[in-house]
Image: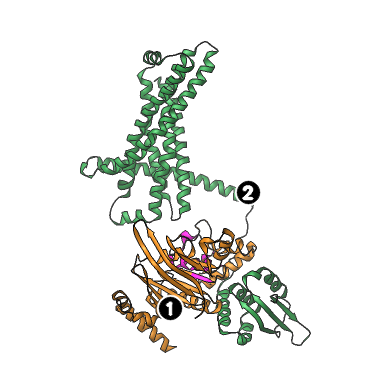
Amino acid sequence: MTVPSATLDITEQPSRLRIVGDWTLAHYASLKRECERLGSQYGDDTQVDLSQLGRLDTAGASLLAELLGSERLSRCTDELPDASRALLKNVYCSVQDYCIPVKEPEQPVLLLLLARIGRAVDQLWQDTNQVLGFIGLILQTLFLRLFQPHRWRVTPVVAHLEQTGLDAAPIVALLTFLVGAVVAFLGATVLADFGATIFTVDLVAFSFLREFAVLLTAILMAGRTASAFTAQIGSMKANEEIDAIRTLGLNPIELLVVPRVLALLIALPLLTFVAMLCGMIGGAVVCALTLDISPAMFLSLLQSDIGVQHFLVGLAKAPFFAFLIAAIGCLEGFKVSGSAESVGAHTTSAVVQSIFVVIVLDAVAALFFMEMGW
Amino acid sequence: MTEAVIEARGLCNRFGSQSVHENLDLDLYRGEILAVVGGSGSGKSVLLRSIVGLRRPNEGTVRVFGQDLATLDETQRSLVERRFGVLFQKGALFSSLTVTENVALPLIEHAGLSRADAEHLAGVKLALAGLPISAADKYPASLSGGMIKRAALARALALDPDILFLDEPTAGLDPIGAAAFDQLILTLRDALGLSVFLITHDLDTLYTITDRVAVLSQKRVLVAGPLAEVEQTDDPWIHEYFHGPRGRAAEDAALRARQER
């Protein structure tokens, strides 16, 4: 088989350009180099000899078209088979329409950096605005529907309650049980130096009732439920289902968001309660096994030392966390645009935002409760 | 008769208890444009997926270029698959890449071109498929349905395949675009010796560019042959399909176009 090439024969006058062999994708790189070398060397009077051209595909045709140009191509293709000529003509016409888009000149790095920071700040402002607006929208819908019991959507609420509450209960229980045990171990180790191991009970009970149970549950829900909400609503958005809901004269907030928010509002406090119990059981198990504090003693210490307000302080935070997690999860779902990639990006964003908001709010709440002396 | 590039023999495809194909035989000959028609849900796309190896048929064999894809090892299989160009129904462009990158990807991965060369060639293919330049740097999410079809065709053509599989290529295109698409496929077939496996509902495409038509009905290929032959087959569905109002109109239009030429 002949090696495909383009050679310029300048021994004759006028010079001849010979195109030889298969001009196909397999030889594209080497042929392109050759064409670039030849491009400037031949003049207007050069004869082109295509008689030895072998197979031709779109890649080869585009090279030939670029090498020869339209006029020469139309003059010298008579000897080619019809099919190749048609391909060349087609490729040539489209190459003519096509030109490489001009890249914008690069800007200085410092300017780009500033622009990026500016965009990020602007984005943050808009995101906050959107979250607040969305929360307002949810509250408005909730409030309006509150007085119309015939329009309550009980079935979706129960379905979401199962998904977000019941299905999450085992993982929440296991996780908090383990953390409770770990906290008790830490307490036992540190407090043993002061001969105060008995206060391990207080440590576990305080930390779980006030902070750990609700915080751990909320973080778990942010990872598990916020992402699920975003993915569900996001893929509906990508599939134009949200638009379909709107054109049917229905309200997507009422149909999709309110049931999810309500479900999480019910589920998160319940799960928090489960988490408190399991955390303290984990602590009690460690106390019984390593510190000789029997479960009965653990209970009596709980009863005498720990006021009920700690339980209330912990539980009071749960609905706020629930509302924010659900709102952020749903809002990110609505922000999805078209592609599958966008669903992924917004799911990540929903998890990050909701965990961030939960921890910030918890810190603020801790300060507030401390100042109030609750 | 010329050699068959695809031979499907005794193909059975079942989903649970529902069977889509029973004992289906089909050949695609080198250099022909074969249109597969059939009612919605008659398993046209499933047939395409079985042939290109995306779905392992429950029974039967598919031989491509004389080789059974299911029995080949990974490298050989990849070599055969490079000779396929597939245009999926919804385009299936990679959403994280721009249109140009979508077309350049197989060129970089398989043809070993440098990025600049690949993108240049990708531009040519895009132009060939009739996509405006302004769309080349866009992401698929911001393209219209017709543009996605064209970009996907450009990607299917990237490696200059031997067999082109087209799943409803003209659906969703405007009539001008659809006609240009038909002509483009004809030109490419003539120039490159492509074999084209075409699933379509577009009667105009059927009458203008196909060499043979295979009718998929009752879980098998009811009849396969030149259009004139298929039209005359004595089957109520086929009769309805080709001699219904739309069928007649398309036939008349194709006839008129031929006379004018």
Q: Which residue is drawn at 51% across and 61% down?
A: B70
In contact (CB < 8 Å): disc 1 and disc 2: no
Which is more toward the observer, A146 or B233? B233
* SS at circle 2: helix
Task: State the separation of the CA atoms marked 1 and 2.
Answer: 63 Å
| Whole-percent x, y for residue A15 in the image | 74, 84
* Chain drawn in orange: B
| Whole-percent x, y for residue B135 in the image | 51, 65
- Is B140 within the magenta? yes
Whether A52 is drawn above or below A104: the answer is below
**Disc 1: CA contacts within 10 A as few (<14), some (14-19) or many (>=20):** many
| Whole-percent x, y for residue A303 in the image | 36, 15
- Direction from residue B40 to residue A347 in the image, left or right: right
Range covered by the magenta-colored residues:
B135-164
Q: Residue at x 62, y 87 (%)?
A: A79
Q: Which mark is residue B212?
A: 1
Place residue A77 in its image quadrant: bottom right
Point out the residue furthest to the left here: A150
Q: Mark 1 lies on which chain?
A: B
Q: Which amino acid does label 2 sit on?
A: Leu
- Is A152 within the magenta? no
| Residue A125 appears in the figure | no
Q: Residue at x 45, y 36 (%)?
A: A357
| Residue A251 appears in the figure | yes
Place residue A247 in its image quadrant: bottom left
* Chain drawn in green: A
Q: Mark 2 lies on which chain?
A: A
* Quarter of the image that includes the N terminus of chain A: bottom right
Whether B69 is drawn above or below B213: the answer is above
| Whole-percent x, y for residue A227 in the image | 43, 43
Please give the residue where the numbered disc 2 appears in the rendered image: A110
